[in-house]
Amino acid sequence: MPIKILLVDDEPLVRAGLRAVLEAQPDIEVVGEAADGAAVVPLVRSLRPDVVAMDVRMPLMDGIEATSAVLRTVDSPPKILVVTTFENDEYVYGALRAGADGFLLKRARPAEIVHAVRLVAEGDSLLFPAAVRDLAAAYGQDRPANEAREALTRAALTDREEDVLRLMARGLSNAEIASRLIVGTETVKSHVSAILAKLGARDRTQAVIAAYESGFVSPA
Amino acid sequence: MPIKILLVDDEPLVRAGLRAVLEAQPDIEVVGEAADGAAVVPLVRSLRPDVVAMDVRMPLMDGIEATSAVLRTVDSPPKILVVTTFENDEYVYGALRAGADGFLLKRARPAEIVHAVRLVAEGDSLLFPAAVRDLAAAYGQDRPANEAREALTRAALTDREEDVLRLMARGLSNAEIASRLIVGTETVKSHVSAILAKLGARDRTQAVIAAYESGFVSPA
DNA sequence: GGGCGGCTCCCCCGCACGGGGGAGACGGTC
DNA sequence: GACCGTCTCCCCCGTGCGGGGGAGCCGCCC
C-alpha cells in the first residue's frame, strides 16, 4: 500500500520535478496535482492522499491558508509537508503553526525529499532534515546564504563517493570503476553501498537517476 | 584476419559502447582507444588499425584536425569513420572534406554500427546509413528539422519498448515494470533485452543514461 | 592519548539481472 | 495465403550486484 501524495504548487515545473522524484519510488504514488491552495480542500476530499506537498506562495490561496483550511474542514486529514525555496522562511513557520507536519526545501536532494515524504507519512511530524539543520548552523555562523544553499543542493557524499557516482553515471561497472580509480572492486562496492544508502536509492540505476535529477551530472 | 579498429572519443561511455558493440563481432578487433584527437597520430602509427572511429567534438584536437593530421602524416592511412551525434553536422561534412571515409551516428543501432565499420573497412567510402538517408529525405521534403532530429536521436524502439524504457528511467525493477504494465516479468525481460541491444547498452543503467543523454527523458 | 570519519580491503550470501535460446498469437502487408 | 514485426510468455544459466558483517590504516580534532 503505497503512500498517496498530492502535489500543490503554482509552478508546473516544480510539480513535474516532485512527481519525477517521487514516482521513481515504488512505495510512493502521486495521486494528483493542484496549482493553487484554493483547489486543495476538494481534491483532498476526493483523492484522500496520505500526504500533501504544499507550496507556500501561491496566487489565490497561499499554503498557510490552505493548510489550516484542510485541517479545519477535512476528517482525518493528510499529513502536510510545506515546500519552500527558503527565501521566505517566515511563511514556513506560519504554515507550521497552522498545523503543517514538516517542511522541505525545493533544492533538497531527491533522496531527502523522498525521505521527508516517508517520514511524515509515518507520522514523524515537524521534520527537520539534516540539510535544514546545516542551514541553521550556517546562519548561526553568519556565513553567506549562497554557501549554505550550495551545501544543501549537494549531496553529503565524500569526495571519493562523488568520484564513484560520477563514474556510475557514465555507465561503468564496479570492476571498471575499480580499475579507473586504481582500487579493488571491494572498495568500489563499499563506496557504492554508501552512495545508495545516502541517496536512498535501491540500486545503481536509481542512484544515477538521482545524479541526473539533482543536477549532479547533466545531459550533454 | 579481423578488422582492427581504434576508438577515439572523449566520452568513456561512448568508447565503452562502441567497444561492446564491436567486440561482439568475431571479425572486428578493437586495438586501442584514445580520448582526444591529439593522441590519434602516434596511436595510428603504433597500432596500425584498419579503421579509426573518430569523434568530432573533442577537447584538445577535434575530429577534423585529427583526420587531416592522420591522412597527412601516416603512410597507407586507415579508413576514418566520423562518429557524430548529428547536433553539428557542419563538422561532419568538414571531416568528410578533410578526407574521412564515412560517418555514423552515435544513436545508430549496433547492427548499423557494425555494418558501417565493415563497409568502410572494405573500401566503400562516404557511407550513408539508413538514418542519414531518412534525414536527407526529411530535409528534402521540407519537414521541420526537429522532427528529423527526433527520428535520429531516438533509437527505433517500439511503443512498448518506449514504455518500458520510461519506467526503467524512473528506477523501477523488472518486476515493478511488469506489475505496472500488467504483464509478466519474462515479457519485461524480453523488452529490456531488446532495448539494451538497440541502444548498445550493456545494462539497464547504461540504457537509462542513454535515455537522459538523448533527451528521451529529462531531469526535473 | 583517544575518538572519529574517510578510504581501503575482505568474507558470505541471495537474488535480480541479462544472454541464449524458443514459441504462440495477433495484426498488418504483399 | 504467406510473410513479418510486435507483444506476450517460457526455459536454462552465469554473474554482477547489493546487503550484511568485519578490519586495518590514516589524519583530524578534542
Image (spheres, coloured by chain):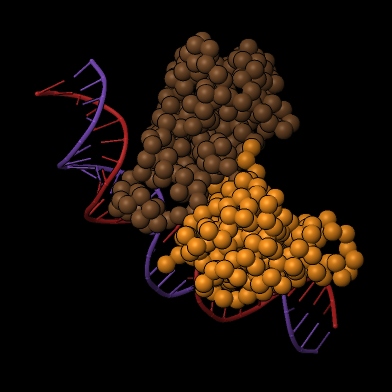
Chain colours: A orange, B brown, C purple, D red
Q: From the top left corner, tell me how far across and down residue A74 is, in percent.
A: 54, 68
Nearer to the camera, A202 or D27: A202
Residue A65, image x, y percentages: 68, 63
Seen in the picture, residue A10 relative to B117 is either above or below; the reply is below
- Does residue A165 lie above or below C7 as drawn? above
Residue at 58 percent across and 28 percent down: it is: B85
Q: In the image, residue B187 lies at what x, y percent?
A: 31, 48
Residue in the foreground of this view, choosing between A5 and C2: A5
Outermost residue, right direction? A142
User: Residue at 63% across / 31% down in the picture?
Assistant: B43
- For the N terminus of chain B, the quadrant is top left
User: To which quarter of the image does residue C24 belong?
Assistant: top left
Which residue does the image show at 42% across and 40% down from the upper left?
B162
On the image, which quarter does residue B190 sit in? Answer: top left
Q: Is residue A82 left or right of residue D4?
A: right
Residue B22 position (above or below residue B137): below
User: Looking at this view, is A65 or B58 the one in front?
Assistant: A65
Q: Is residue B180 left or right of residue D17?
A: left
> Which residue is at the far front?
A73
- Residue at position x 52%, y 73% from top? A76
**Relative to A106, is C30 above or below?**
above
> Does residue B198 show up?
yes
